[in-house]
Image (cartoon, rainbow, N blue to C red):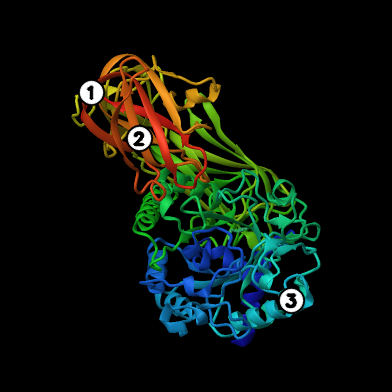
Amino acid sequence: MIRKFFVLLFVIASCSPKAPDPIFPIPSERQLAWHKMEYYGFVHFNMNTFSDMEWGMGDEDPSSFNPTDLDTRQWAKVAREAGMKGLIITAKHHDGFCLWPSEYTEHSVKNSPWKNGQGDLIKELAESCKAEGIGFGIYYSPWDRNHAGYGTETYISYMKNQLTELLSNYGEVFEVWFDGANGGTGYYGGANEDRKVDKRSYYEWENVYKLVRELQPNAVIFGDAGPDVRWVGNEHGYAYETTWSNLLRDSVYAGMPEYAEMYSNGQENGSHWVPAEADVSIRPGWYFHAYEDHKVKSLPQLLDIYYKSIGQNSALLINFPVDRRGLIHEKDIEQIMKLSTKITEDFENDLIHNAKLVASNERGKGYEVENVLENEWESYWATEDEVVQSSIEITYPQKFRFNRFLIQEFIALGQRVKSFSLEIRTDEGWQEIYQGTTIGAKRILRLDDHFTEKIRLNILDAKASPAISKIGVFDAPKLLVQPIIHRDREGKVHMEIPESGVDIYYTLDGTIPSKSNGEQYVAPFTMKEAGRITAISIDQNSDDSSEAMVQNFDIAKSNWRVINDDPNSINIVDGDPNTIWTNPKNEVIIDLGELIHIIGFEYLPPQARYFSGLIFKYQFSGSMDGKSWKDLSIGEFSNIKNNPITQQIHFKKTQIRYIKLTSLETWDGKPSQYAEIGVLTVED
Ligand code: FUL
């Protein structure tokens, strides 16, 4: 019986071909486990949250750290519900303040009023992540602007001691994140000086990595140079059309100035497997600033990030700047959940299952093309050795529509594909719809709608015979977001939407447009008078529509003249919120070109991330002749720093030709800046 079994086993083994040889480098077990996580969150929360800074100096008083409603369970719950597989917390940022009561410093939560110094935020978050079933990760800034010994050997021992605390006392850690930014001015225990370190040698990285391996053998280590996971080279959350997981790791060190430009794509001939992780904040800043409450990323922006990171062979790490209460802000939750709903919707129905697959070459038993239907981490389609150029034909019983194509390589054997193309069958024959380079762990093509009965994936070039573990075909519903409406100085109205296959319809009478009662937007049109534009986007296929965008415009500024010699002063009446003017004086006069009845004015402060000169106290006057002035309003734009949106001030109807806005005080004492100034002639 036993003999028969072995004979059978021998027969089976002899007809199954052997697996393709791996092409080195290949991922380690811990990297493979990390690849499966794909999407996880960052939390930037500590002293900077309370000092309203991005990079604290290190001299902040621990007594400032005082969240009122801290709830790490809320963070973990939001992350899980958003589809994230873990959370990484800034245990210590560049300012050196520690979120756990470290034995080695007084600069920590133990000297803060939070929980009377008895709290341990790292412990709370580790427990919350466990309770929500997601991974827990640690960000630790090597640069420390608080520590007196920074720059000397003492600090290296301190860093190792702290890492030992963090990696021994809080359970399993999935990723240890070492920031590349380091060395510069700081408090340094009162020295207040500039300290530079040799980024290659100072931190004794090899010893630090050894320590992490000993304490957390399953954790991946992130850094510019890995060793396990590398920075994608920008903070916008985008990987690249060509993204290799292979990296010439020995040529890179953390914080190297030329890293982004030279190494962040990875290299085809890279010596080590060091895949990319794309990090990005859901707001402009990594830390919470109330003045960015209106700048939380929109769904189109987040979706773009998703497709350009996860869809381009990278993991995605989205940051929540937790607020001073100690909670993820409602607006951030709203946006991240919109992304999660949209992603679920886009990939809900894998149409590959309706198709019949035929490969141009098959390695044999166990490597059949049907393996690409599911189980992306276990089985795969492979060709015979030496057969690189190959294709898979995907045939449907009838014409159907698709706009997403997903491909995954079986990366346990290394990243192999160098270029590929996608074709569809038309009445005229095969038509190429995409040419791509790398695939890697996951590649998602975001395409226009295509109708066909046959799709063909061609592997054009590879480092060795391809091994493809998954193919997916999807018909993602259109992204139906409100159109963006913009009007320039001449009164030309432009509208935009992020997706093709979607039309814009609008009305000018305040009613909600539809295909029948609205006008289709095809090209910019002129509207010089005051008016209301209501616009929606409508999916050409399904007729589903977005919510309506309602935008009120007052009279166009085509005849307006800023009475000033500085050519940049035109920027404040050009209708473009992105151009600004800095006025060395504290008043500006505008000639409206004719006598007009106005009932108010508006001021849009600069919209750039780092702005100054926001007018806080103002005086607004009008004149018939530009000589004798009448004060129309005096007051303050109370919340302008926290919420720098358009400020509208109303007053009694007055006829004037000239307006004068005087800045009585800017919030930072700097010369006043303006993005736009306008008048109100009608009630909204
Ligand atoms: C950067 C840091 O300097 C930022 O403050 C932030 O922590 C970001 C994730 O990494 O290098």
Q: Nearer the viewer, residue 663 or 637?
A: 663
Q: Is residue 679 above or below residue 33?
A: above
Q: Residue at x 53, y 46 (%)?
A: 610
Q: Which residue is mark 1?
A: 654
- Neighbourhood count class around disc 2 (C-alpha, 10 Å): few under 14, some 14–19, many 20 upward: some
Q: Secondary structure at mark 1?
A: strand
Amino acid type shown at disc 1: Thr
Please state, as top left, top right, bottom left or bottom right, where the C terminus lies in the image: top left
Q: Nearer the viewer, residue 161 or 611?
A: 611
Q: Nearer the viewer, mark 1 or mark 3?
A: 1
Query: Along the horizontal axis of the image, is 246 left or right of 632?
Result: right
Query: Along the horizontal axis of the image, is 131 left or right of 580?
Result: left
Q: Nearer the viewer, residue 8 or 527?
A: 527
Q: Residue at x 44, y 30 (%)?
A: 587
Q: Earlier in the sequence, mark 1 or mark 3?
A: 3
Q: Earlier in the sequence, mark 1 or mark 2?
A: 2
Query: Along the horizontal axis of the image, is 578 left or right of 10?
Result: left
Q: Is residue 515 visible?
A: yes
Please state, as top left, top right, bottom left or bottom right, where the N terminus lies in the image: bottom right
From this viewpoint, which residue is outermost toward the front? 628
Give the image quadrant in which the ligand numbered 1 is located: bottom right
Q: Secondary structure at mark 2?
A: strand
Q: Position of residue 260 (x, y in %)?
A: 69, 49
Q: Secondary structure at mark 3?
A: helix
The disc label shown at residue 316, or none: none
Q: CA distance from mark 1 to mark 2?
A: 16 Å
Q: CA distance from mark 1 to mark 3?
A: 69 Å
Residue 322: which quarter of the image? bottom left
Q: Position of residue 485 (x, y in %)?
A: 36, 30
Q: Which residue is mark 2?
A: 619
* Ligand 1 under 8 Å from disc 1 Cβ: no
Q: Is residue 252 above or below residue 303?
A: below
